[in-house]
Amino acid sequence: MSTLTLEDILSKTSDLPTMPAATVQVLRELDREESSAQSVATYMQQDPALSARVLRLANSAFYGTPTPIMRVGDAIMLLGNINVRNLCLVASTYAWMTKPLPGYDLGPGKLWEHSFAVAVGAELIANETRSAEKGHAFTAGLLHNLGKLAMSVWLENKLQAIQLLAERDDLSFDETERRVFGFDHAQVGAHLGEKWNLPKPLVDAMRFHHNPDACDPTSSIVDCVHVADYLASSLGYGLGGDGLRYYLAEGSLTRLKLNADILEGLCEPFTEEYDRFMKLFHEKDAA
Amino acid sequence: MVSAPVLVGMAEIHVLRDSGLLSCLGLGSCIGIVMLDPETGIAGMAHLMLPESFSKKPTDKPGKFVNTGIQELIGQLERAGADRHRLRVAYSGGAQVFKFGSEAGLKLDLGARNASAVKSLLDELGLDTVAIDVGGHTGRTMTFTVETGIVTVRTVTQGESVLCQLR
């Protein structure tokens, strides 16, 4: 058993991601009941790059406005709170989520691909099941694997041995991480999320995305992220060296009132939504 | 000089003649399938995601589904000059999540269902299947060298190994 602590992992890992202050303020303002497009714009304008991206999306062919949108507040009104929230998250996380993570055998862009797929899938499931607010499900999906960013360096050159241990003892990958390090990437992510002062539902999604039944009380957002993670991994979006060595918790399916037929029926719209969102939000397309 | 592989992304189909590398990265429950006509040297690879389309609407990505993807791959090979009766086939992928709790899981096991759908269709079409590597819980990368006909599969635990030679 390792003597490392969660604090060790975070304090000894250089280059940990940070969330821009303007993004945190915009997300909080979007959640405030009395917020308006103008009040959100006030915070967004602290970050010129973010403002430019919102304006660019509002003026893209996708929205086809007859006259150019010049003001950030007008762009926010056109796009709607959910799209603004998602765009902020995508813009703020893209740079560090596209880095390669050799500890998980994830090449450049692969953590991003997986996280984005889980975000899109969680939003789709939240919408289909009317179980959680779509924007929150997207955010939780995008951030669920944050812990891998911190854990990757500790797994480098150990991944094969960890997988062989998992095979030998018939363990899931997160169980094996806990056996080797004393904790898994989900716990590390939740610890980081708490340091960022993220809302509890998002921290719960990070902590329990492989073990949703352990979340007390159970959470629809956690369930949506868990099932979306299953879909995204199965379909191969950003699949790493940990592969599919994770449990699918039937408790999540039961709570979301999803059965095998409904879930399989979601696969096709999931891939279509992923393609649509990629066109809408992807850095290269939006640049 | 070793040429860079043509990466066959999800739902994509690529056809090459005589030389080059084709590769499917990060196959989970998806299937990477390769076909070669040894006489003409025309080869192709598809990255299939789901057993079959459920919606009735036509898809702009036939490679997404086993039933439409295999037919499209054969069609592209034939249009390039291959003969379907000479095609030699190998496929890989079809992994599944770690454990399911009940019989519902059997239906949720996309990997096994993809693999089963591929086998059924290839049998129905009477194609010569040379090698199959499916199942398990790890992701796979499948690479095909057109010149030699060698198909390799890489996993984290096993490294890279030769699955078969199609020539």
Image (cartoon, grey):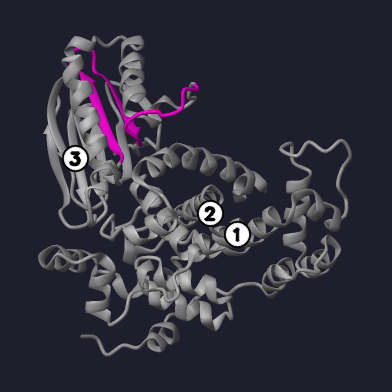
Q: Residue at x 30, y 17 (%)?
A: B74
Dot in front, 3 or 2: 2
Span colored in magenta: B30-57
State the separation of the CA atoms marked 3 and 1. 45 Å
On the same chain: label 3 and label 2?
no
User: Can residue A64 be found in the magenta stretch?
Assistant: no
Chain of the residue displaying label 2: A
State the separation of the CA atoms marked 2 and 1. 7 Å
Q: Is residue B1 visible?
A: no
Residue at numbered disc 3: B152
Q: On residue A133, which mark appears?
A: 1
- The amino acid type, in three-letter code, at marker 1 is Glu
Please tell me whether mark 3 sits on a helix, a strand or a loop.
Answer: strand
Circle 3 packing at 10 Å, graded few (<14), some (14-19), many (20+), is: some
Q: On residue B29, which mark appears?
A: none
Q: Is residue A133 left or right of residue B70?
A: right
Residue A122, compared with residue A285, is above or below; it is below
